[in-house]
Image (tube, rainbow, N blue to C red):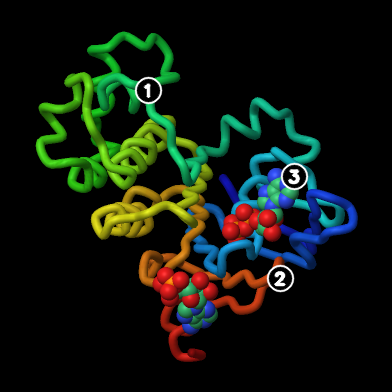
Amino acid sequence: DGHVRFEDVAFGYEPERIILKGVTLDVPAGTSMAVVGPSGAGKSTLARLLYRFYDPTAGRITIDGQDIAKVRQDSLRGAIGIVPQDTVLFNDTIGYNIGYGREGSDQDEIEEAARGASIDHFIAALPQGYESMVGERGLKLSGGEKQRVAIARTLLKDPPILILDEATSALDSRTEEAIQSTLDGVARNRTTIVIAHRLSTVVGADQIVVLDAGRVAERGTHAELLAKG
Ligand code: ADP
Ligand code: ADP
């Protein structure tokens, strides 16, 4: 479950200005794809189309063979977890932020869930002393730490498809590690699309697509792209 395909997708926010053109992608269920490319290439736009903030002006996007334009919005969004590039957290505990939106948002339950096995990888990447900070209020987190909390929150919902948009965030090296560990571990059983600025963040992706001016300029594994220069 979670086979994502873009078939010759084109899109423009305004009709006279094409942002994406002829984009064809195939992300088999349970695999990861990283999208890299310069700022303004259309990487975030691609994610917005998959989440149906917008619809393509040409071509189509399918999940498990179904055109997403014909899938109910709530079931589409239930299937996709998205971690936006500029995460806003509630002025509350890490536990609250990770558990927010879960059924029966009882604080203890949330904190228990936040400690759960599915985010083990992230606990290592979260701020030092994370375990004791789960219930602590008034935390001052860096941008990178906030993003790790947002990743954990999204993973807790266990979506079959995960989109991580880290394109323009000011990432510290520990956040890069967290993203890398998503690719290496947590994301293994879900379809994962990572939007990244640096190729070095996504060494573990099953495939990497280089987007340039709205077109796929290169694709391959990390090693293949390095060999091409
Ligand atoms: P990237 O993620 O690769 O940096 P984006 O997808 O954010 O690129 O943006 C691609 C292009 O689309 C840019 O030229 C940007 O200015 C434009 N763009 C992005 N969002 C909007 C919007 N909401 N309305 C109009 N143009 C937009
Ligand atoms: P910056 O210097 O702006 O931080 P990086 O060099 O860290 O960017 O990030 C990698 C960027 O360089 C990506 O945006 C990608 O488009 C490009 N890039 C690097 N190596 C390759 C490659 N082998 N093939 C295609 N694009 C590459």
When asked about the image quadrant of residue 123, the answer is top left
Please report the residue visible at 44 percent of the width from the left and 85 percent of the height from the top. Answer: 226
Q: Is residue 29 visible?
A: yes
Foreground of the two, 184 or 90: 90
Q: Is residue 65 visible?
A: no
* Disc assigned to residue 167: none
- The residue that label 2 is drawn on is 215
Left/right placement of residue 200 relative to residue 138 reads right
Q: Helix, strand, or loop for circle 3? A: strand
Residue 105 position in % (x across, y down)? 37, 11
Residue 197 position in % (x across, y down)? 47, 64
In the picture, the quarter occupied by the N terminus is: top right
Question: In this picture, is 28 found above or below 135?
Answer: below
Amino acid type for the residue under numbered disc 2: Arg
Residue 175 position in % (x across, y down)? 30, 53
Please report the residue visible at 47 percent of the width from the left and 49 percent of the height from the top. Answer: 164
Q: Is mark 1 within 8 Å of ligand 1?
A: no
Give neighbour class at mark 2: few <14, some 14-19, many 20+ (Cα, 10 Å): some
Please report the residue visible at 43 percent of the width from the left and 14 percent of the height from the top. Answer: 103
Alpha carbon distance from label 1 to label 3: 35 Å
